[in-house]
Image: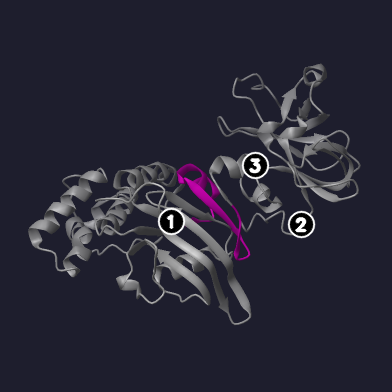
Amino acid sequence: MTRDTPGSADLECLALCKQFDAFTAVDHVSFAVPSGSFFSILGPSGCGKTTIMRMIAGFLEPSSGDIRIKSKSVLDVPPNKRPVNMVFQHLALFPMMNIADNIGYGLRRQGMAKPEIGRKVDEALERIGLPGIGKRKVDELSGGQKQRVAIARCLVLEPDVLLLDEPLGALDLKLREHMKVELKALQAAFGTTFVYITHDQSEALVMSDQIAVMNHGRFEQVGSGRELYYRPETAFVAGFVGDSNRWKGRVTRAESGLLQITTQAGLQVTGADHGRGLATGDQAELFVRPEAIRISRQAEDLSHLENRMSGQVTTLLFNGADSRAILEPQTGGDPIEVALPQSGEYADLKRGDVLHFAWAGDQANAFAVNDQAAPSLEAQ
């Protein structure tokens, strides 16, 4: 299987729009997916990501805009003639066929000779790490093995772009975590361009080269997982990607890129606007990651940080290396979530203990208040 020069775009969507009567599902979305890359569209249910996928596949016609694969428009190309293939959440393997026949199904429909089909199927099984299982039945496989067979059935046809519509959604948690690694490895092994849609930020962050965060029919930001996590460009991205503590209030001082915000509870917190141009008097929202907050039993250990408070432990959330504590600030206001160090120094922490906590101003992201800044838990 040959690929184009790295960096060339296998897929381009240009000012793509889709309207259903008066409702705009996709609103002038443009993006390009480099050849051989793993590109994810991440967003809450109803944001338009599945509509984009169905337009690329040819199941929906755009209201306006263009879709190009290998620089050629495919708007007039029917779905079965487009150089794309699609993996759905429900894998739709044929239970009456063995594994080899499932993988070779599309090749037979193309009229390929039987010996060549056998060679390609064997090669695909080798590349998905399941050599020698071609004669087994579908119901003899585990969930993860079925997932790999479904992907191999698509990839053996050598599509320019493979579309994946939340393919891990039906798997249990442990298998889903394992399949994140498997999918990334399969994409690298085949070198095929993947376009993956999901509402699960963990899936997108772990697997993707680039992620587009979508909200209300538009892309809020496109970037690497690291860029989205550490330098979100909008309040929606800051609230949707990862966990954050949040404060809303009014900017009472703006100086050298740092903002002092007086919250609705009367607290004074400091953060950075990273060039967003917030000024004194603006309404703002501040986002601070739980792991950016330092904790100590001694207040003097945190004297070098701008934001210093103390609070009582109300809840302990043990999750191994990702354990958290919820603190009730003694000055009032919303509870604060902090990440507990992995060293075990706080292994004896209990409810009712008082901790000091603080964060550096440049570790907090400030945004102008936006009604869409804080996606609901149901949306995530």
Q: Is residue 314 visible?
A: no
Residue at 71% across / 54% down in the picture? 374
Estimate the x, y position of residue 356 in percent, counting from the top left. 79, 25
Q: Is residue 87 left or right of residue 334?
A: left
- State how far apart marks 3 and 1 are (Cα): 23 Å
Q: Say the numbered circle drawn on residue 370.
A: 2
Q: Quadrant of residue 329?
A: top right
Q: Residue furthest left?
A: 115
Q: Reply above or below: 206 against 309.
A: below
Of residues 136 and 362, the one nearer the viewer is 362
Secondary structure of residue under mark 1: strand
Could you tell me which secondary element the residue under label 2 belongs to?
loop
Amino acid type assigned to the residue bearing label 2 in the image? Asn
Q: CA distance from mark 3 to mark 2?
A: 18 Å
In this rendered view, identify the residue nearer to me: 220 or 242.
220
Residue at the image point whose x is 25% and y is 43% from the top: 129
Graded by Cα atoms within 10 Å as few (under 14), some (14 to 19) or many (20 or more), the crowding at tag 1 reads many
Q: Amino acid at mark 3?
A: Arg
Q: Which residue extends farthest bottom?
A: 21
Residue where numbered disc 1 is placed = 195
In this orientation, which residue lies closer to the viewer: 374 or 91? Answer: 374
The one of 39 and 67 positioned closer to us in this rendering: 67
Q: Which residue is mark 3?
A: 231
Give residue 46's quadrant in the image.
Answer: bottom right
Sooner in the amino-acid sequence: mark 3 or mark 2: 3
Inspect the image, locate mark 1, and give the three-letter code of the amino acid beneath it. Answer: Val
Residue 10 is left or right of residue 236, and the answer is left
Q: Earlier in the sequence, mark 3 or mark 1?
A: 1
* Depicted 291 relative to depicted 25: above or below: above
